[in-house]
Image (cartoon, rainbow, N blue to C red):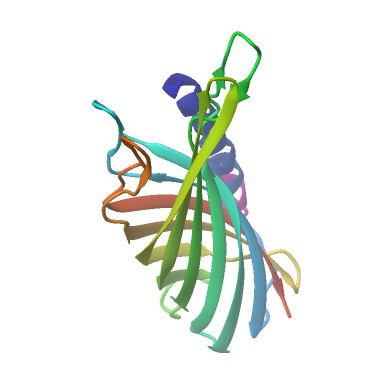
Amino acid sequence: MHARKHTRASRCWAALALLAASVCGRSARAEPPPRELVFGIAPHLRTSLSQSCQRGGDVVECQDLNPFAGADVSLHFWPIDLLGLGARIAVSTDLDAAEGASSEGITWDPEDQWLWRFVADARLDPPLLPEGLWFGAEAGLALLVETQQSLQDTRVVEDSATRAAPLLGLAIGWDFWLGRSITLTPELRAELIAFGDPPELRADVEGRDYDASTWLELALRFGYVF
């Protein structure tokens, strides 16, 4: 199960990294116009950098990486050339292709996770840096919705729980201008999310324990400048 998950995640990481590298390799780009209001949408890949564990009865299962994929939408306002203020809503799902199957042909998903983030951020684009390169800081709220299915007799039973945690992060990105209104931005983001103790999904089964974990995210943002 884990081999299949990590192979799928590795392919996604490689594809997104290749696309970002091709954008960064552009030797020429249009002269950037003044930024005022920028709407963006970005696919991303992310993973936790710390080990997570899950208890089921007397068995504790742990894994080192927890790959997720998803997308976000953002809106930023630039009151001055070197400072951007905005907000971002992001959602990701775990890259777990495993499923249960019975001799009667019944299938179920042992574990499904959706990670939501609601973030306010600030971006600094000082004139000493190359044109378009910026650093950012963010703070917000993360919600983890975890669902587990199990087979009881011939019925698939679903249990779910939602937990919330504060989020703090840092980011770096590079805006490449494709004409007067379109930007393409590779972004690298590190976030700290403190989820705390996992909830109990059902008797003797807990949600995945991320505790206070660091997450790394690679995104490619398509922006439209109003």
Image location of residue 50, percent across then percent down? 28, 43
Residue furthest to the top in view is 103
Residue 38 at what x, y percent from top left?
65, 76
Residue name at image x 56 percent, y 55 percent: 91
Task: Between residue 55 and residue 186, name the one nearer to us.
Answer: 55
The answer to whether residue 23 is magenta is: yes
**Residue name at image x 55 percent, y 27 percent:** 97
Foreground pick, 13 / 54: 54
Residue placed at 37% from the left, 65% from the top? 167
Q: Is residue 210 left or right of residue 140?
A: left
- Left or right: 169 with respect to 8? left
> Who is closer to the viewer here, 91 or 133?
91
Quarter in which the C terminus is drawn: bottom right
Give the percent coordinates (x, y) of residue 43.
61, 52
**Corner quadrant of residue 16:** top right
Residue 205 inside the magenta-drawn segment = no
When the figure is inspected, residue 44 is found, relative to residue 169, above or below; the finding is above
The stretch of residues the image draws in magenta is 21-26
Using the image, determine if residue 126 lies above or below residue 66.
Answer: below
Query: Residue most toward the front?
Result: 153
Residue 223 at x, y = what percent? Answer: 67, 67
Magenta: main secondary structure: helix
Can residue 124 be spotted in the picture? no
Q: Residue at x 53, y 38 (%)?
A: 158
